Image (cartoon, grey):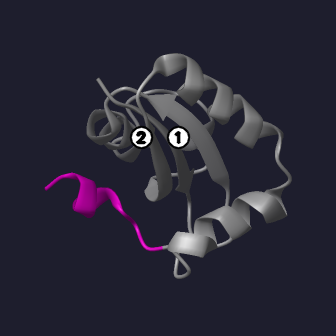
Amino acid sequence: MAYYVYILASRRDGAIYVGVTNDLVRRVYEHRIKAVPGFTKKYNITQLVWFETYDDPISAISREKELKKWKRVWKTQLIEKDNPNWNDLYESICK
C-alpha cells in the first residue's frame, strides 16, 4: 500500500494545507467537495499542488509533521520546484 504526503492550496500564493493519506484521490476529492469541516473547507483549499509517495505510514506521517513545521517560503519553494505555476494536479492522479 502507498501513503501520500500532499499540499493543497486555495490559489497560487494563497492558503495552503499539508496532509497525509493512504488514498490520495479519495482524500483530495473530499477536500474538493468540502466533505469535512475544518481549515480546508473554511479557506476553500481544494487544489492539489504537490505530493510525495511513501511505502510505509511511519515515514509519511514523519514527513507530514516535518513539513507542517516548515516556514511558508520553504513550502512554496518545494511546490515550485516541480510545479512552478501551481497547477492543480488532481486530474493527473485520477487517470
Between 12 and 80, the residue placed more toward the observer is 80
The residue under the point 72% across, 42% down is 67
Marks 2 and 1, the one that precedes in the sequence: 2
Percent position of residue 81, x then y: 60, 73
Q: Is residue 86 visible?
A: yes
Residue 52's place in the image compared with 4, above or below, is: below
Q: Which residues are magenta?
A: 87-95
Q: Amino acid at mark 1?
A: Lys
Magenta residue check for 8 = no
Left or right, 42 with reference to 65: left
Percent position of residue 55, x then y: 40, 28
Magenta residue check for 91 = yes
Q: What is the quadrant of the C terminus in the image? A: bottom left
Percent position of residue 89, x then y: 36, 63
Counting other residues with Cα less than 10 Å from the Cα at mark 2, is it few (<14), some (14-19), or many (20 or more)? many
The residue under the point 45% across, 53% down is 46
Q: Amino acid at mark 2?
A: His
- According to the picture, the residue beneath numbered tag 1 turns out to be 41
Left or right, 28 with reference to 72: left
Q: CA distance from mark 2 to mark 1?
A: 7 Å
The residue under the point 51% across, 73% down is 83
- Contact? badges 2 and 1 (CB < 8 Å): yes
Most extreme residue toward the bottom is 85
The secondary element bearing badge 2 is classed as helix
The secondary element bearing badge 1 is classed as helix
- According to the picture, the residue beneath numbered tag 2 turns out to be 31
Q: Is residue 14 visible?
A: no
